[in-house]
Image: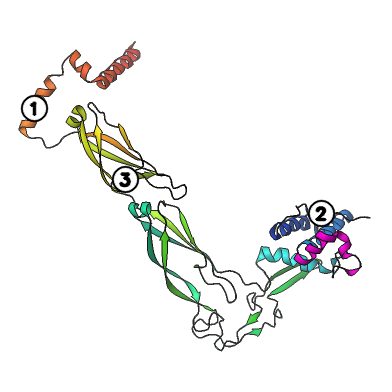
């Protein structure tokens, strides 16, 4: 009976990577494992077939030979340890790989150091134009006294619990689970003379000073990744990463909306009525805008290109200035007199002519009461 193509068995393409191969095998092994299927012969056959395919395709050397010669490469011993056995002698090894990933048993490969997060607070101007800032991060670093080995004299011994493998196996019938060795923590090595400074951990707490380059245009929630600047890992492993998260403080004048900036510009009602030229602030200095006569509260003036330069697209946003007509306060006697004379000019139809919004509002109120009382 001819064998199915190994790629077809796992349901993957010929260009599949290591992670995709392992994921495909894990799915099939879980589905067809005999313990789950009550001794079903078809499931057992599928399990053996998937195991055989995984043993070949997960090994780069065997995979290259298989891609060139197919199944013939492993007939008659050509491929070393045969892919045709497919028995249950190695079930523990295969499921050790699967459950080792799930439960943390990664063989002798020590786990990576933890990632860290640091929040940096910026003024709006700093976020818009970018800067370089020094930060101090409390973290675990490699012990300088023992160079991260955890040993006072630099000597380490093979762990007698796992015989240097870094993992131990728990077996219940046919089902086997591998996990990190509890004695050596998965290193496969033990320290007989612990370092006095780090007590054998290989790491010590320290505040690390770093210089962070913050690009122009960042906003609250943006993160900058510093590879390898997180916590030092256990001896023999790589450190984690540091993520610098941006938080932009509220600004006294501007409010940011994406790449646009908004601000309110108060003006006197005489300036709004007669028109005026106003100086308004931008992040790069003052500019002038012309307010036409009879301008109402809420009118927006758009200053193109005076917003924020995007950190992603490098396009520049706009500044939107919203005019707010301000009622004068603390009037002098003369100002009150002039305003009274001015107000006296609004009577009858003359008032409706000069105050269209007020007239429209009053007309609406009248129609409302007519409907209510009719």
Q: Which residue is mark 2?
A: 9
Q: CA distance from mark 1 to mark 3?
A: 36 Å
User: In screen coordinates, is 157 left or right of 69?
Assistant: left
Q: Residue furthest top?
A: 374
**Disc 3 crowd, CA 10 A, few/some/many (<14, 14-19, 20+):** many
Image position, residue 119 (x, y; %): 42, 60
Task: Please name the residue that numbered disc 3 is placed on.
Answer: 254
Image coordinates of residue 120 in percent, x first then y, are 40, 59
Mark 2 or mark 1, which has the lower sequence index?
Answer: 2
Does 165 sit above or below residue 369? below
Q: Between disc 1 and disc 3, whose residue precedes?
A: 3
Asked if residue 66 lies in the magenta stretch, the reply is: yes
Left or right of 290? Residue 193 is right
Q: Earlier in the sequence, mark 3 or mark 2?
A: 2
Q: CA distance from mark 2 to mark 1?
A: 94 Å
Q: CA distance from mark 3 to mark 2?
A: 61 Å
């Amino acid at each position: 009976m001819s064998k199915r193509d190994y790629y077809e068995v796992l349901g993957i393409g010929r260009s599949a990577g290591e992670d995709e191969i392992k994921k495909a095998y894990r799915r099939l092994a879980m589905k067809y494992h005999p313990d789950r299927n009550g001794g079903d012969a078809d499931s057992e056959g599928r399990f053996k077939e998937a195991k055989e395919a995984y043993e070949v395709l997960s090994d780069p050397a065997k995979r290259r030979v298989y891609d060139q010669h197919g199944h013939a490469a492993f007939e008659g011993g050509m491929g070393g340890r045969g892919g045709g056995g497919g028995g249950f002698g190695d079930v523990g090894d295969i499921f050790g790989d699967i459950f080792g990933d799930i439960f943390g048993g990664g063989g002798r490969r020590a786990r990576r150091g933890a990632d860290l997060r640091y929040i940096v607070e910026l003024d709006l101007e700093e976020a818009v134009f970018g800067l370089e800032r020094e930060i101090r991060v409390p973290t675990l670093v490699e012990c300088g006294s023992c160079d991260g080995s955890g040993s006072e004299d630099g000597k380490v011994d093979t762990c007698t619990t796992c015989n240097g493998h870094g993992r131990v196996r728990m077996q219940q019938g046919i089902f086997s689970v591998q996990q990190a060795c509890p004695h050596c923590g998965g290193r496969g090595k033990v320290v007989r003379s612990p370092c006095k400074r780090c007590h054998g951990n290989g790491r010590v707490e320290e505040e690390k000073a770093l210089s962070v380059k913050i690009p122009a245009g960042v906003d609250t929630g943006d993160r900058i990744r510093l590879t390898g600047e997180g916590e030092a890992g256990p001896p023999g492993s790589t450190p984690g990463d540091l993520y610098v998260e941006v938080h932009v403080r509220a600004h006294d004048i501007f409010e940011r909306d994406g790449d646009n900036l908004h601000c309110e510009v108060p003006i006197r009602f005489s300036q709004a009525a007669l028109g005026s030229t106003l100086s308004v602030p931008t992040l790069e200095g003052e500019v002038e805008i012309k307010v036409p006569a009879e301008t109402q509260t809420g009118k927006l003036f758009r200053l193109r290109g005076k917003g924020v330069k995007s950190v992603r697209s490098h396009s520049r946003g706009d500044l939107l200035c919203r005019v707010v007509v301000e009622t004068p306060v603390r009037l002098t006697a003369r100002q009150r007199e002039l305003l009274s004379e001015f107000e006296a000019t609004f009577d009858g139809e003359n008032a409706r002519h000069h105050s269209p919004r007020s007239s429209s509002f009053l007309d609406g109120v009248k129609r409302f009461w007519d409907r209510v009382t009719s």
